[in-house]
Image: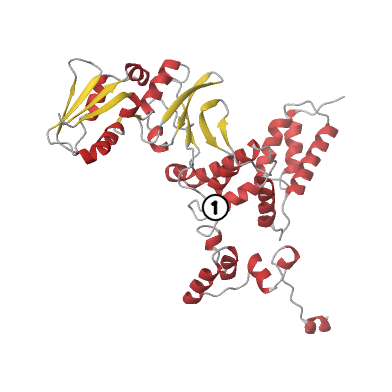
Amino acid sequence: MSFVTVEEIEKLVEERLVGRVPPKIVDEAKQVLRKYKLTREELERILNEIVKEYESSTVDPGEAVGTVAAQSIGEPSTQMTLRTFHYAGVREFNVTLGLPRLIELVDAKKTPSTPLMYVYLDEEHKYDKEKAKAIAREIEMTKVENVAKRVDVDIFSNAVIIELDPAMLEDKGLRVEDVKKALERLRSKKARVTVSEVNPYEIIIQFEEGIDPTKIEKIRDRILKMKIKGIKGINKVIIQKRDNEYVLVCEGSNLAAIMNVKGVDYRRVRTNNIKEVEEVLGIEAARTLLIEEIMNVLEEQGLDVDIRHVMLVADMMTRTGTVKQIGRHGVSGEKPSVLARAAFEVTIKQLVDAATRGEVDYIRGVAESVIVGEYIPVGTSRVKLAYNPYITREL
């Protein structure tokens, strides 16, 4: 039995596939097929199967791809359970999944219910747990309330006394001096911050003016919310070992700030916040993330939906250069047809607004054609035929 050589494989692939399938498939076929020992007959059968599969997956002219996509995503998504799940491997986080997450994505919410980031480290830091821990401490936002054991307000001496928790200070990699420096930024009233001589973990904030008894809770809350260190928006960081490297899983998201942290591999940082990706990395990155997130939700629920339907939804949401929701404030609300907009939501308002602006509906879409009883412009109705009896008679 004689097997074809690598050169013969490449030549035959080019002969049979070039011009019939996209160049990417041609390149992939060359890479994969050269790994196997194949006879000429086997190779030809494989190439014929590639062409057959590709041609069977193409869309016919006039096919109602939007309706098919809507059915393909809408029907299985109604079977989703309305639950929130613990994220796999991260018990500390409750992550919004299932139908609530799908609604978040198609509504293009500015911030997700549970923003998450996956921070990958560079070569110097990713194999060392202590170095990973140091970066985690640096980016995790730490407030006074995270390290305080108790906070008392003494009205008679015009002072606020904060007792710090030594164990929490050690866990966050902080010193009493760090907390004192942060509290010195308190500018609401003239205040002097000192460390107690009796207890080294007690900080006293002495106000020069009298404390208004009605505003005690407000002052106390403001002190507790004061930032000591870290990146705004990153509330909690967990260190995970994936394969042979350490990865930081963050509750909260701040893509621009995290990418500038020394020791972080900015090319591999990931977030589930679509709008943030759009602002920092651009619309193409936002589109890719939108597709990935929707597919992850569907696959996590065990639903088999072709990715091309999801890609079509993502294309519609991002085609204007910004991420827009599927709804009256986005894709559906910006349709050129008055009747299509009115058929979706707030019918009277849409019709009145269109009338005041003197809009014209040319009945070119599906919804408006159904409303007026025209043929729907899909399938065979996409074809327009003109018949001239005089030309026929002459022939």
Tell me, what colour scheme is on the image?
secondary structure
Task: Find disc 1 in the rendering and name its residue.
Answer: 317
- 292 with respect to 192 (left or right): right
Q: Can residue 365 be seen in the rendering of this structure?
A: no
Q: Quadrant of residue 53?
A: top right
> What amino acid is labelled 1 in the image?
Met
Quadrant in which the N terminus appears: top right
Front residue of this view, candidates 240 and 55: 240
- 192 with respect to 292 (left or right): left
Quadrant in which the C terminus appears: bottom right
- 130 with respect to 41 (left or right): left
Where does residue 362 sit, x and y in percent of width and height? 60, 73
Q: Secondary structure at mark 1?
A: helix
Where does residue 70 sit, x and y in percent of width and height? 66, 53
Front residue of this view, candidates 83 and 211: 211
Q: Is residue 296 above or below residue 6?
A: below
Furthest residue in direction left, as rendered: 208
- Identity of the residue drawn at 20% across and 38% down: 213
- Identity of the residue drawn at 81% across and 80% down: 392
Q: Can residue 88 be seen in the rendering of this structure?
A: yes
Where does residue 189 sit, x and y in percent of width and height? 16, 37
Where does residue 296 sit, x and y in percent of width and height? 60, 38
Q: Is residue 226 above or below residue 194?
A: below
- Identity of the residue drawn at 45% across and 24% down: 122
Task: Give the tally of numbered discs.
Answer: 1
